[in-house]
Amino acid sequence: MSRPETSSRLVMKFGGTSMADLERIRRSAAIIAAEVRAGRQVCVVVSAMAGKTNELVAWTDGAGKPAAGIDPCDDEYDAVVASGEQVTAGLMALTLRNMGHRARSMMGWQVPVLTDTAHGRARIEDIPPDNLARALEKGEIVVVPGFQGVTRDGRIATLGRGGSDTSAVAVAAALECPCDIYTDVDGVYTTDPRIEQKARRIDRISYEEMLEMASLGAKVLQTRSVELAMARRVPVRVLSSFITPDADGRLPGGGGTLICDEEEIVEKRIVSGVTMSRDEARVTLLGVPDAVDRPALIFRLLAEASVNVDMIVQSQSRSDASVNLTFTVGRRDAARASDLMQSAKAEIGFAELRVDEDVAKVSVVGVGMRSHAGVAQTMFTALSDKGIRIQAISTSEIKISVLIDAAYAELAVRALHGAYGLGYV
Ligand code: ADP
Ligand code: ASP
Ligand code: MG
């Protein structure tokens, strides 16, 4: 898989496994050196060493929660968790220098990567390209820590877990160049290769399909990075960092996935991929009075508390004039959603509340669904053949998702992967 060579500039992002220790950093540096040798100006974006951010997050948890009446410490959480990338950016610049290259690190506040003030899940608002461009023009390899930025009042902010992908795409958009994401798999697969060994690498995938796959659980790219790439038309490749340049310092060709416009894809598929997310919780209100204003009331309470609702199912209960209402939220919002419902029990008038976190969402994604019938039927047949009960369904133009018992999630992924003929035979 190759991308059209339109730019002599390139952003190269290396994820946590590719930066896991000094040896992995040296190997990633050799890949960067190969692109520099090929005449490119390279801006590198790095993640923290694999596992580092989890450790930092655990430390901030260990430091305790603020007492009642004291502001939340999200800005200090960011000051701590952003440090993992500061270390690897410096180490990568050091390694490149030791290999004879001109290289320097440039922290989020130095670039600057300007963000809003939503600490812990900040959005990038702007990256003025001048400082980066000046260094690149001087012949330096610039190494930028992913995941971090700076608010307009000078506080460090982080972009949410997996956010270095978004940093990389945002830097590429600012520099108007392509973005190569180096990770521990050699591309985007038809499903997570850790779940299904028969998964196949996808040569090219559209922004839209990749956006659905990422938001439905394919963690190979952070959802926001795909959103940004799509909005700014940044060509993104996903590649393996487990490669070695040849004796002449050239990178092996082949492999990888290009994320691009639908029109650039020759091979037409109905279904491109299967994804799975365990980050789901099901909330059920039993015996809600069948009054026209109740759904509006329930979802207003959730919206006011910024709880994102995904699937919704309402069913008539057979015995009286009441309905059962089921909805799903992200797992971390389950307790909040439950508290909100309990505190409005009298107003809503439901009989019983149930929350179940032992659920998973399995989805099939493909732009071909727009013009082909029978995709849902294949899905439901494959699941029923395995005896897997569907608890809720949601669809969009290019995806179908089902909520199932978490215990069957991987079985369902494999069954669907086979049913759509996605794997190797
Ligand atoms: P990095 O540390 O480089 O950011 P991640 O762990 O965030 O890497 O993402 C890579 C992982 O994403 C792979 O190891 C793979 O298990 C997982 N993954 C999930 N779904 C897919 C998919 N459809 N294609 C490729 N990888 C996937
Ligand atoms: N280090 C951060 C994380 O683990 C960001 C990233 O790797 O993309 O979430
Ligand atoms: Mg990642």
Image (tube, grey):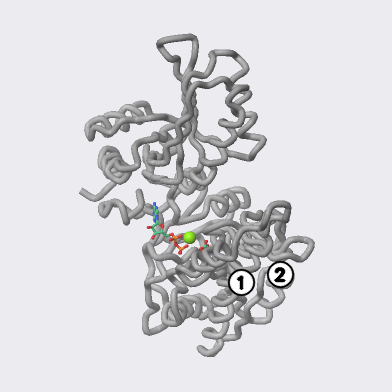
Q: Position of residue 9 (x, y in %)?
A: 59, 69
Residue 293 sits in quarter: top right
Identify the amino acid type marked 1.
Val
Residue type at mark 2 is Trp
- Residue visible at 63% across and 65% down in the picture: 148
How far apart marks 1 and 2 lie (CA) works out to 10 Å
**Residue wearing tag 2:** 109
**Closer to the camera, 53 or 322?**
322
* Residue located at (63% from left, 61% from top): 158
Give the label, 1 or 2, closer to the camera.
2
Residue that carries the numbered disc 1 in the rendered image: 144
Residue 238 higher or lower than 330, as above or below: below
User: Measuring 39% from the left and 45% from the top, which residue is drawn there?
Assistant: 275
Question: Cβ of disc 1 within 8 Å of ligand 2?
Answer: no
Q: Earlier in the sequence, mark 1 or mark 2?
A: 2
SS for tag 2?
loop
Residue 396 coordinates in the image, percent (x, y): 48, 32
For the point 48% across and 29% down, which residue is it? 353
Q: Quick check: can you spot residue 174?
A: yes
Image-based side of 147 in relation to 266, left or right: right
Image coordinates of residue 42 in percent, x first then y, are 58, 73
* Left-right relation of 90 to 318: right
* Numbered disc 1: secondary structure: strand
